[in-house]
Image: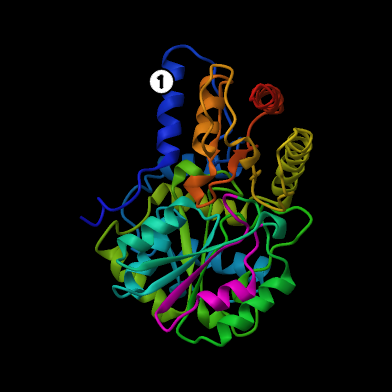
């Protein structure tokens, strides 16, 4: 009954159409995938091979090896200015597991979880799985989709348990400036029952607005569960390795859930994770940022040149999130009505052969998500086909 009440995934619906078109031989250009388009650093791959060659394939300590958790602590202190001990770190199978386990451990039925929209698709479902009540607050494109303190304040009640802050944001690419984060922290200080779930998985991918770790703000260390991992900055998506860092009582509670669920993450992935933190120098990240910035600028420029499209400039991650509601109510060349973002994305998929994700999947029905984590050749073709498809609507 709990699962039956969850909404069907629009991302799955679009994926099913893409799979069927590809089966028919249609060359679909996908701008839907949420993972980097480059391989992991060679040091990571070498470490994975070394782990296999050494036979490091057995169970490890349930929260992750001490070596990995120590490397995470060193990274967070060096790069983010926050100090944790290894027993405050819990490694799991991706950052998503850390979010789910923490909320299972810390939420009672009926507790409220504040989720700014646009949101990552899993936040809503995770809250529901924990029998918590999602409370969605809507962010505005004109404010670069950043959470505003007055909206957060208005949403908090005595039942509020978590506030989820995805920074940088999936799906919008928004990066909250330091001054705004400090104002959000002022709100949190007034409500001691609220825990901040700071999803910072994209923290290594920012452009002109630097990332500030929420736990580094005075008074927020004790109130924050930091979520991070290895999927985005070093492209280890298939390794399925993430972690949480939190006050010890929260980490211990989440560890109880993991101990009765998956136990330790993959041993080979952990060995590769240590290499990612200790052997990959800053040059790798800087090169990828140059690459992503070039693609971001190209896509934003092309979208802004299309009549009817409003597109904020994202400051992080590898997504743009344009508003496309001006096309609702128009008809395709074949006479079909475009009623919403799902209809527009389905049209662009079937007729223009470009896969995009409708904004409704992220709680933003007037928009769509475009990933630019692909080649410039594909981006150029996709932008041409999107532009032609939109211009053909009447």
Looking at the image, residue 316 lies above or below residue 66: above
Check the picture and name the quadrant holding the N terminus: bottom left
Measured as percent of width and height from the top left, residue 74 is found at 60, 68
Q: Residue furthest left?
A: 1
Check the picture and name the quadrant holding the C terminus: top right
Q: Quadrant of residue 367?
A: top right
Q: Residue furthest top?
A: 25
Question: Which residue occupies 42% across, 24% down?
Answer: 19
| Whether residue 216 can be seen here | no
Q: Choose between 283 and 381: the one closer to the eye.
A: 381
Residue that badge 1 annotates: 20
Q: Is residue 201 left or right of residue 97?
A: right
Measured as percent of width and height from the top left, residue 62 is found at 33, 63
Q: Choose between 209 and 329: the one closer to the eye.
A: 329
Q: Choose between 368 and 267: the one closer to the eye.
A: 368
347 part of magenta stretch? no
| Whether residue 108 can be seen here | yes
In magenta, the rendered stretch is: 145-171
147 part of magenta stretch? yes
Q: Is residue 245 left or right of residue 134?
A: right
Question: Which residue occupies 55% across, 32% down?
Answer: 344
């Amino acid at each position: 009954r709990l699962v039956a009440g969850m909404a069907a995934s629009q991302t799955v619906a679009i994926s099913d159409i893409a799979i069927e078109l590809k089966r028919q031989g249609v060359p679909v250009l996908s701008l839907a995938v949420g993972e980097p388009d480059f391989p992991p650093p060679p040091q990571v791959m070498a470490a994975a091979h070394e782990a296999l060659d050494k036979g490091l394939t057995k169970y490890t300590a349930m929260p992750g090896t001490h070596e990995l958790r120590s490397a995470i602590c060193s990274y967070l202190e060096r790069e983010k200015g926050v100090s944790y001990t290894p027993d405050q770190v819990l490694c799991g199978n991706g950052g998503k597991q850390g979010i789910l386990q923490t909320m299972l451990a810390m939420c009672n039925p009926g507790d409220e979880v504040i989720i700014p929209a646009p949101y990552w698709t899993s936040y809503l479902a995770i809250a529901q799985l924990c029998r918590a009540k999602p409370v969605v607050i809507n962010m505005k494109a004109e404010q670069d989709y950043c959470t505003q303190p007055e909206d957060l304040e208005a949403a908090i009640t005595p039942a509020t348990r978590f506030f989820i802050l995805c920074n940088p944001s999936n799906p919008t690419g928004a990066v909250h400036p330091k001054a705004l984060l400090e104002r959000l922290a002022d709100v949190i200080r007034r409500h001691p029952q609220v825990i901040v779930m700071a999803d910072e998985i994209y923290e290594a991918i920012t452009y002109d607005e630097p990332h500030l770790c929420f736990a580094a703000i005075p008074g927020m260390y004790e109130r924050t569960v930091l979520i991070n991992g290895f999927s985005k900055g070093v492209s280890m998506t298939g390794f399925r390795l993430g972690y949480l860092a939190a006050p010890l009582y929260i980490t211990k509670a989440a560890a109880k859930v993991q101990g009765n669920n998956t136990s330790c993450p993959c041993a080979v992935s952990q060995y590769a994770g240590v290499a990612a933190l200790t052997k990959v120098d800053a040059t790798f990240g800087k090169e990828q940022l140059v690459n992503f910035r070039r693609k971001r600028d190209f896509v934003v420029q092309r979208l802004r040149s299309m009549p009817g499209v409003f597109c904020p400039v994202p400051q992080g991650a590898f997504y743009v999130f344009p508003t496309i509601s001006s096309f609702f109510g128009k008809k395709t060349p074949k006479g079909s009505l475009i009623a919403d973002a799902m209809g527009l994305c389905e049209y662009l998929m079937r007729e223009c052969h470009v896969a995009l994700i409708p904004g409704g999947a992220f709680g933003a029905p007037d928009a769509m998500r475009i990933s630019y984590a692909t080649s410039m050749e594909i981006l150029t073709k996709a932008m041409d086909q999107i532009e032609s498809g939109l211009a053909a609507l009447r």
